[in-house]
Amino acid sequence: MNGRFINGAIDKHEKGAKPMSSFRYLPMTDEDQVNMLKTIGAGSIGELFADIPASVRYQGDLPIEEALNETALLKEMSRLEKKNVHTKDYPSFLGAGVYEHYIPSVVNHMLLRSEFYTAYTPYQPEISQGELQGIFEFQSMICELTGMEVANSSMYDGPTALAEAAMMAAGHTKKTKILVSEAVHPEAREVLATNARAQRLELVEIPLKDGMTDIDKLRSSLDENVGSVLIQYPNFFGQVEDLQSIEEIVHNEKAMFVVSSNPMSLGVLQAPGHLGADVVVGDAQPFGIPSQLGGPHCGYFAVNKKLMRKVPGRLVGETEDRHGQRGFVLTLQAREQHIRREKATSNICSNQALNALAVSISMSLLGKQGFRELSEQNIQKAHYAKRKLKENGVPVVYETPFFNEFVIQLTKPVKEVNESLLAEGMIGGLDLGRFYRGREDQMLAAVTELRTKEEIDRFTTVLGGLI
C-alpha cells in the first residue's frame, strides 16, 4: 500500500496517501475506518499507535514501489513469471521426494468443482456425504496399496506422517528410543528430530552401508528401550531395502516397524504390510499432485487393525442410515478437539482433503493395470538411463536394485554440472552435498515415466561430455 508512515502507521489524511476506497480488494472502506477509530476513542491511526515509543517507530516512506493498476500489475507479473525455469519447457531429472508424474487432465476438472474446492471440515455428515465418501475412497485405496488394514484421511505430507508414526509408536510401546536409518530422507529426519526433542525422546541414526541401512549396526543398536525402527522403501538413494530381514530383527526386540514408502513404487514392489510393517506412511504426491514449489502435499498413514485407535488425525467410516442407505461419518476420533486433551494421540487438527481427492481421482483413472504399467515404466526408463550413463563414461555409485532414482558419481561439484545442464535446457538431479558431507560430487538423478527416450539420451550424452 502507498502512503507515508505517521507515528508508525499509515494515516490516510497525510498528503499524497490514497484513501482506503482506492484499493478495490480491501474490504474496509473509509467509513469503516472512521467508525472503528471512533468506537475505540482514537482520532486517527497515528493516535492509535501513540503508545509505541517514538524510538522504535518507523519514520519516512516505505521502501516499496508505487501501486500499479490491475492491467499493469498483470503485465509485470507475467514478465517476472517468464524468468522462471519450469518442467513444461525443461525436462527434469530432479526427484528426491517430489516427482514429476503424469496427471490425467480429468483430475483438475473434478477437483475444481465448487462443492469440492470450497468444502470445509465435514463435521456435519448430513451435508458432507460427497467429501466424506471421497476421503473414504482415499483411505480404502491406501490400505490396498500398502497392504495395511486401516488408513486415516491423510496428513500434511510424508515427513509429518513419519514423525507422527514415531510419536504414536513411543506412546503405544511406552519406550523412549527411536532408531531411524540415514537412508531416510534428510528433511524427514529433521522433522522427526524436532518432534522427538519436544517429546524428550532419544533419536539414534543408523549409518549406511553401500547405500542402504547397515543391518549389522541396526541389530547392535536395538535394545529394550527402542519403541520403533524407521526405514524408507525405496530409500532416499532409490535403493530397495530388504524389509523382510529388517522386520525379523525389529520384531525380535518387540519394537514397532515403521516404513516410509513412495506409493508409486508399490505398483511393482511388495507392499510393506505384506512384509510385516506395523505402520506404513509416505507422501501421495506422485498421484495427481504437481511438483509445485514444494507443496502442498498429501501424507498418508496406514496401520494394522490393533493400532486403529491410536491413529492420529481423522478417520472416515462407512455406516447405514435408518433407511438402510450407505453413508459416511467421522469415526474413532482421537484428536484433542474431540476428546480430553490427555487422551489425544496427536495435535494434528486437519487433513489434506482436496489433495487426497486428487490422489483418489488419479488412482481411480489409472486403475490397477494402468498403475502397474506406470510403475514399470519408472523402473524401465531409470534402468535405461543408468545403462546409457555408463556407456557415456559416467559411473553409477550403487549396483543394488533401485526404483526410479539412483546416485551418479561426477568429477566436479554437482552445482557446477547442474548450471551447465540448465544452460543446455535441462534440470539436473539433486546435489547430495546439501545433505551428506563428502558427497558434493554425487548427484541423485530421478527418471519418471514422463521422460522420453530422446530426453534421456540427450541428458546422458551431455552429462558424459561435462565430466
Image (cartoon, rainbow, N blue to C red):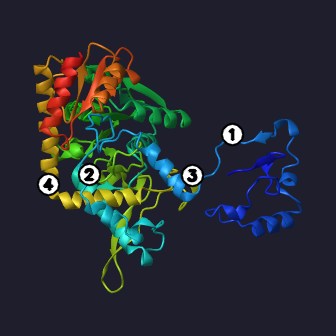
- In the depicted structure, whether residue 100 falls above or below residue 306: above
Mark 1 or mark 4, earlier in chain: 1
Say what amino acid the circle numbered 4 marks: Gly
Q: Which residue, given by chain and number where applicable, does mark 1 sit on?
A: 63
Q: Marks 2 and 3, Cα distance to the nearest angstrom?
A: 28 Å
For marks 4 and 3, give the one nearer the viewer.
Answer: 4
* Residue 243 in the image, given as x and y percentages of width and height: 22, 34
Label for residue 161? none
Task: Please name the residue shown 88% across and 60% down the image.
Answer: 42
Q: Marks 4 and 3, Cα distance to the nearest angstrom?
A: 45 Å
Task: Please name the residue shown 36% across and 38% down the image.
Answer: 85
The secondary element bearing badge 2 is classed as: loop
* Residue 322 in the image, given as x and y percentages of width and height: 36, 85
Q: Which residue, given by chain and number where applicable, does mark 2 sit on?
A: 148
The secondary element bearing badge 4 is classed as: helix
Q: Quadrant of residue 35?
A: bottom right
* Residue 83 in the image, given as x and y percentages of width and height: 41, 39
